[in-house]
Image: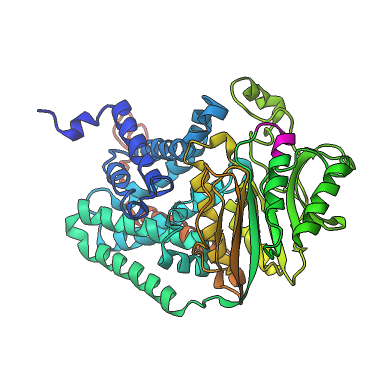
Amino acid sequence: MKTFGHWLASPWRRSTVATLAGALPVLAFPAPDLWWFAYVALVPWIALIRSAPTAKRAAYDGWAGGFGFMVGMHHWLLPSLSVFIFVIGALLGALWAPWGALVRHFLAGTPSRGRIAAALTVLPSGWLGIELVRSWQGLGGPWGVLGSSQWDVEPALRLASVGGVWLISFLIVAVNVAIAVLVTVRASRVPAVAGLVATAAVTSAAWMWSPRPDTRGTTRIAVVQPGVVDGPDKRFAREEQLTRDLAGQDVDLIVWGESSVGFDLGDRPDLAKRIAALSAETGADVLVNVDARRSDKPGIYKSSVLVGPDGLTGDRYDKMRLVPFGEYIPARSLLGWVTSVGKAAGENRRHGSEQVVMDVGHGLKVGPMVCFESAFPDMSRHLAEDGAQLLIAQSATSTFQQSWAPEQHASLAALRAAETGRPMVHATLTGVSAIYDASGQRVGQWVGTDASTARVYDVPLATGTTVYVRFGDWTVQAALLVLLAWCATDGLRALRLRRTAPQPRVPPARTAHGSPARPGR
């Protein structure tokens, strides 16, 4: 009977197994939401890579696993991007090829304790390097960062306040490496156990000593979620009806979802007056989101626009980070054909130039973001630095109603709240809408994808500065330093070995007469 190792000798079989192993971590995210699975989900993938016969094959295993992870994490984009989702998965999956070679370098065969100890630092650092690269907006942004799977775990949220979601990712990978060593390399259990103990110690230290948000007062926020309504006019009418029902509820701010207004308010003063009337009737400013061609400048923008009882207040935020293919097509002259095989943007939207903190009255300052900008830790951190007391993300996932996308998107706000120590509102057109306090815990219940309602929340406000806001992405910077230090050390070691290696003895050339010194004799 052939062993499993012999069965894996086929490159295609091995790549298939690697693809499936790489997709396993997706189960830790919403909607399956098996958060605990993240701590073992990488073990099969790591075990497969370490068994690779060559470094080149390990790189292929890393690439195939990265492809599986990317496609699995974004599978709900298939109806919009069609087969192009597999092209994107292959391109982004290539980021894991060097990581695969790195795994084999440290864990192949029977590694020494020193190599395993180094692996517990270098391999998580390599993973963070991948997450950093793919977090660039042009590559799709940081959707599916491994640490985001812990959005509903209180100790992990405390870690986020110290080192952002990056610190959670680092520790998750370190735990997976340690468990993989325990399972596959029994002779090296000591450093693996030490790694698990160190991870527990870091988590405990963050739990005990990281500063907690200082809660002071509350604000009353209303979220208007109209549900699935066809056409901008009907949607506006439904939002108007739901907002009118908030009269007399003493709210401080009313938030509509992304693309809640399909017309430029400068070009449609009648709509601006209707929203202003709602503001006067409810006693609160209304933060809408306009998705339309601007009347004062060329191009289509997505903008958070604040409307008060006297009309437009002048506070406006134009979305800065657009969704690739959904809101613009990179290198449209080369990739414009994507519109023929999926639901890619027919025209590129324009992006804004700076973030904005708005004074909405009642002594409240808010920092708006639009759609998947809530996936970027740096954006919410900068808003907190600029004085925002409440973070807001206006979103719309109506295209993906029956997928995992609405839950995944809503969960991101918990991480941003915990990182910044500021409460966050995630308001959508069609669900899931959610609110989190300054520690990342839910305030009230989610508004699901089946609801059409206006819901009011009493949101605790907080003061103070988290470690993450103060020091920024120090976890990523430390990981890059680890990688640089390892590269330098490994390079010096290779150079030293090359210099000290004995030179091969070359016999002297002999002439036809057999004398090397006296030719011809």
Does 469 sit left or right of 363 as displayed? Answer: left
Q: Residue at x 87, y 57 (%)?
A: 310
Q: Residue furthest left?
A: 1
Which of the pair 441/231 is nearer the observer? Answer: 231
Does 20 sit left or right of 252 as displayed? Answer: left
Does 401 sit left or right of 378 as displayed? Answer: left
| Residue 192 vertical position relative to residue 57 in the rendered view, above or below | below
Which of the pair 452/112 is nearer the observer? Answer: 452
Q: Quadrant of residue 298?
A: top right
Q: Is residue 423 visible?
A: no
Magenta residues, as a range?
230-235
- What percent of the width, then of the height, locates residue 382? 67, 63
- What percent of the width, then of the height, locates residue 395? 63, 46
Q: Residue at x 51, y 50 (%)?
A: 131
- What percent of the width, then of the height, locates residue 115? 31, 59
Q: Quadrant of residue 32?
A: top left
Q: Is residue 96 visible?
A: yes
- Dividing the image into 4 quarters, which one contains the N terminus? top left
- Dividing the image into 4 quarters, which one contains the C terminus? top left
Which of the pair 465/236 is nearer the observer? Answer: 236
> Is residue 270 shown in magenta?
no
Task: Identify the main secondary structure in magenta.
Answer: helix
> Is residue 233 shown in magenta?
yes
